[in-house]
Amino acid sequence: MALEKYKQKRDFGSTPEPKGDKPRKSPAGRTPRFFCVQKHLASHLHYDFRLEHEGVLLSWAVPKGPSLDPATKRLAMHVEDHPFDYGEFEGVIPSGYGAGIVMLWDRGTWTPEVDDVDAALAKGDLKFTLDGYKLKGSWVLVRTKGGYAGSRGQEGRSWLLIKHRDDWSSGELDIAEFAPLSVKSEGDFADILSQDNPAIWRSNRPAQGGETGAMFDKIIAQALEMRAAGARESGSGTRDSLGAEAPRAKAAGSGTRRRSSKAKAVKTKAAAKTKAAKSTKRR
Ligand code: MN
């Protein structure tokens, strides 16, 4: 599959995103291969759901994120294939296409429940099993017929991501709310931004006003505060609190590490609660 659309949309001189020029041979048949979900705060918050297939990542943007409830069908807009390398990407896209913050929200392997993935995609009905940190068990992606309201010119791009009923489904647990942090850095959006340049969108942020604008305002303020606290605690005395050109390791400082251990605690608690929910359900 081709990455032309992926490459067309990006200026690799100004985005940290992978160029995707390392070819990859993906397994075939009912063999586990890589999957990930990237939580992406851009013009709107969404979750990019990606399945490795034939050397690239098939990609769907899921505005509300995956749901563990089989009764909750989540809209998933089919978008351009992404390079395999993209699957581990987490960071800040300063400007241009997708400008915002990318968090690696889940990763693991997926296994097709069909012999021919291409035929399933053509048919618009792909059943598969996920083995990630947060998402597990059986799922399906189904292409919708006439799209949805306002989808003019988007025919055929609109799919639904649905959890099948099994040991990993849950009608109560909102997984996006319950396990909101990165599986890579264990941080939240503010942690990721604080490792980069929190002052980057001082004048022109990816979303102005509204709910998303408010999220950016809060995250930028948090990230700046973390940088300032890090600089104070490291005793460097350098005035880098605006995130100008501070060395990354030093700028992260102990403030970030403390947040990380807190993040870890929350994650562990979430895992315990998930287990508890499971055992309750099985009783
Ligand atoms: Mn995205």
Image: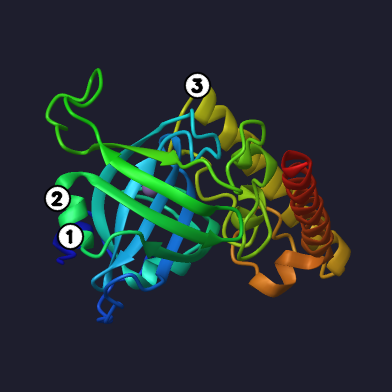
Residue at screen point 79% across, 56% down: 268
Q: Position of residue 100 (x, y in %)?
A: 46, 47
How many marks can you see? 3
Q: Secondary structure at mark 2?
A: helix
Q: Position of residue 32 (x, y in %)?
A: 41, 72
Rendered image: mark on residue 122: 2
Q: Quadrant of the N terminus?
A: bottom left
* Distance CA(mark 2)–CA(mark 3): 38 Å
Lateral position of residue 133 relative to residue 240, left or right? left
Q: Amino acid at mark 2?
A: Ala
- Marks 2/3 in contact by CB < 8 Å: the verdict is no
* Distance CA(mark 1)–CA(mark 3): 40 Å
Q: Amino acid at mark 1?
A: Asp
Residue nearest the viewer, comparing 219 with 247: 219
- Marks 2/1 in contact by CB < 8 Å: the verdict is yes
Label 2 residue near ligand 1, CB within 8 Å: no
Q: Quadrant of the C terminus?
A: top right
* Residue highlighted by disc 1: 118
* Residue highlighted by disc 3: 210
Q: Nearer the viewer, mark 2 or mark 3?
A: 2
The image quadrant of residue 145 is top left
